[in-house]
Image (spheres, rainbow, N blue to C red):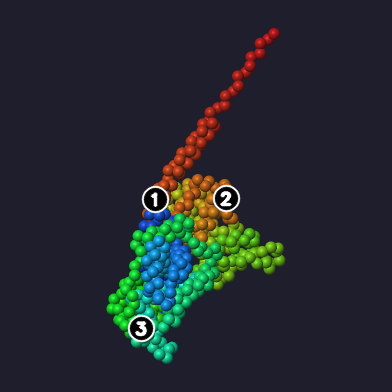
Amino acid sequence: MKNEADHWGSDSGKGAGAGLFRGLARGLQQAVWRPLGRADALVNRLYGWGHNPLYQSGTLVVVLLGVTLVTGLYLIFFYRVSAPYESVARITEQVWLGRWIRSLHRYASDAAVLAAGVHLLRMFAQDRSWGPRALAWVSGLVLVFILFAAGWTGYVMVWDVQGQVLAAEGARWLDALPIFAEPISRAFVGEGELPGAFFFLNLFAHIALPVGMGLVLWLHVSRVARAALLPPRGLLWGMVGALLLLSLLWPVGMAPEADPFRIPDAAPFDAFYSFWLPLTRSIPSWAVWTFGGAMALSLLLVPVWGSPRRASRLAPSVVDERLCTGCEQCYLDCPYEAIRMVARSDGRAGIVARVDPGLCASCGICAGSCAPMGVGPPGRSGRDQLAAVRLFAASWGGRPPRVVVIACSRGAGGPGSNGTDAGAVVFPVDCAGSLHTSVIEYLLRAGASAVLVLACPPRDCWNREGATWLKQRVYHKREAELQARVDRRRVRLAYVAAGEPGRGRSELRAFEPALAALDAGEAAQDADLIRACETPPKRPKRKEVVPR
């Protein structure tokens, strides 16, 4: 069983500079993950893992941006750059359409920031920010920046006191850069009316920025296979319905109109898009650039300072071409498109799998998908798993346990206590998706009465699709499937999140009645067979022959 630090691929932290940063990163990741794990457990109890919005934070951002796009198309027809505040006021006065559509536009954009923040923290805490995943991390940060910029211009469009403060603050920051010949902040001190071009350019930016999101979003998911852009239908419509209901019951009002001759001391700042204004307005612009630049640089460099030392990184998968049959299953199952099929070069006909080390995240899912056990990370292929489980079974000393719990060291939380009840023992694995089904069969043949596999919830697998493919292999005859000779009634798959250590014991206890019924049925069959063998067969009566 790996310890908690191994879950994040940490190293010893020794060495100057880099080791200190890596140790800090590991500590931050675990500090972020603990409250996230507790929140996961709470929401799972309320809605179940299938509709847990915390697991769908990335896809919810896409849905919420879609809502803002649709509602924005309606609002733009009534917006006038020549009279920004008056046009927004008229929209708000439209009780049947304008008021709730504007409110839905506002609430969806706020919720998008919240969902993006949860998604960013989740990817950081799960150590999914370096190596092949670095592109997704950096492009995700760019998406967050565009989202904030689009929201900033949206609030300026209203041209109320909040929009005025945002515009003046942005101008003050830009004046600190040696770009413009004249300070642009002069436009907001009341010396004259704002030019109409300002509102036109602001409107153009508000429309153009979301359009640019499409290209960055494509880049964001370009290195993952079967990227999910939408949440489950129930969660999708539940989220939209909740925001719609909020818009109807609590519509957004109008703040006082901007006054070019007076910069307001206080304004109703939005908690999602302008929460920093009370702080930044009181410090020099150079300090804002210094602090903001340092924060942005530290986030962009997370793939560097947050990655483990090269010596402690898991090696990418390799292919034993002698065993590869060209079935393409590892190519189909790989969640990062790191495997491709190429023509053989060893004189044999057909194709063979090849791994691109630059794209491989060493998740090991290919090891579980290869029936002949010819592919996988070094030391974690199907053959390596069988060698490990043989040693594991040998430690029983001829007294096999009643249940073997195969626990994902990330999803089930890796606690050994999950399998200490009722004579069960734990066999840990790096990812349930990398588990070769031959391991399950071997455990049952070695004398265990049953096998309970505890995997991550499918929508929160650290390697994206591990739990999904495992279920297909065990119950639905996906390639490298559990053989038909194995009694499926003695194999159970359960989903346990990292914040639910007690859930594993609950699943184990829930499995017990079914096992008891199976054991009783088999015992009855054995008893019938023994009685049949011990009872002497009845001899047929000899028919007497009457002489004539």
Kind of residue at badge 3: Phe
Please tell me the numbered disc located at residue 483.
2
Marks 3 and 1 sit apart, C-alpha to C-alpha, by 64 Å
Compared with 162, 74 (above or below) is above
Determine if residue 296 is in view.
yes
Seen from this angle, which residue lies furthest top? 548
Q: Position of residue 420 (x, y in %)?
A: 39, 52
Name the side, left or right, on which 448 lies relative to 328. left
Compared with 270, 398 (above or below) is above
Please tell me the numbered disc located at residue 160.
none
Residue 122 location, quadrant = bottom left
Q: Position of residue 477 (x, y in %)?
A: 57, 52
* Closer mark to the observer between disc 3 and disc 1: 3
Please tell me the numbered disc located at residue 188.
3
Q: Position of residue 4 (x, y in %)?
A: 40, 64
Compared with 369, 265 (above or below) is below
Q: Looking at the image, which residue is at 69% across and 8% down?
A: 548
